[in-house]
Image: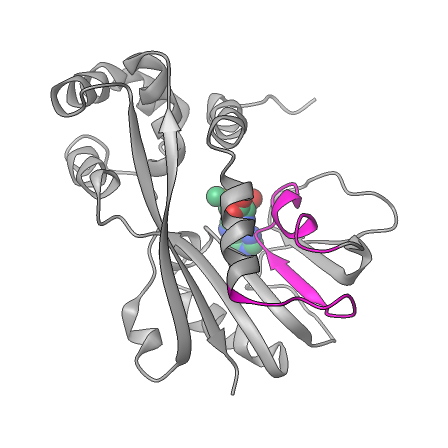
Amino acid sequence: MKKITQLEKNFKKFKRLTKEEYFIAKEIKNKVKIREKDTILDVGCADGKLSRSLVKDSRNITFLDVNEFDFSPQEEFIHSSFEKARMNKKYDYILTSHVWGHFYRNKSFNFCFNKALNLLKENGKLIAIHNSNKDFTGRLIEFSKGIFKKMEFDVFLEKYLEKADYKEDYFNVKLKAKTYRELAELIQVLIIVPDKLYYKNIEKIIKFLKDNLKKPEFNINQRIIVINKN
Ligand SMILES: C[S@@+](CC[C@H](N)C(=O)[O-])C[C@H]1O[C@@H](n2cnc3c(N)ncnc32)[C@H](O)[C@@H]1O
């Protein structure tokens, strides 16, 4: 049986405490009117909770993730990286929530951006969500860069919006823990450092949090971008 990493456990706890999917879904519903017959491709879907919360019938969603997740037999799950996946249909919406950092790290941002636009129907929309890193999260990332050589965080390259027809908005998701240690554990999710390396250095993160926050909590500022294909 596959051993569950601390990062995976922290990821689940992070989602439970922040209710992030609920806030992201609320922003999406404010920006687009998804009709019952619309098809959605959820890229980097994880357990699919976010896109499932947007529609009545999850059979209209194609879930895709490089990691294995459990889906019901009625649901379509493509177990593949987006880079390698072969899709032979087009979608009304492509949802890409907190995945662009992975593409950036894989040096496939450009490829994935164009692939997503090509997989949209005419008048289709690409929805991207990422941490803006303009707030405390950004300071935390800068501090962490001094400790960890290997880390991953959300990135969206602005140049891809230069010629795009899009609308955007910013919103906050609160990360609140009982202690600074618990907060430091949850922060592993924001900077994706492997367990061994992270826990070896966690005291440094705890100190940074204590020095910079009045309480073990802060807002994670996020951006939603809705890009029209045409
Ligand atoms: C931070 S999670 C976001 C999950 C979900 N979209 C959300 O916003 O709650 C990133 C997900 O992207 C997946 N992922 C990472 N690289 C990927 C790739 N190249 N292609 C497809 N999925 C990828 C990971 O396995 C993970 O489930």
Q: Position of residue 93 (x, y in %)?
A: 62, 69
Quarter residue 88 falls in: bottom right
> Which residues make up the magenta segment?
31-55
Q: Is residue 42 left or right of residue 206?
A: right
What secondary structure do most residues of the magenta stretch adopt? loop
Task: Name the residue rendered at 18%, 24% in the picture.
Answer: 213
How are the residues colored? Answer: one colour
Residue 164 vs 13, above or below: the answer is below
Q: Position of residue 166 (x, y in %)?
A: 41, 76
Quarter residue 37 falls in: bottom right
Toward the right, the furthest residue is 74
Taking depth in this image into account, of 79 and 120 the one nearest to the observer is 120
Residue 23 vs 31, above or below: the answer is above
Taking depth in this image into account, of 48 and 5 the one nearest to the observer is 48
On the rendered image, what quadrant is the N terminus found in?
top right
Quarter residue 181 falls in: top left
Residue 217 seen in this snapshot: yes
Q: Is residue 217 left or right of residue 48?
A: left
Q: Position of residue 188 (x, y in %)?
A: 36, 29
Residue 46 falls within the magenta-colored stretch: yes
Residue 153 seen in this snapshot: no
Task: Name the residue rendered at 45%, 50% in the picture.
Answer: 98
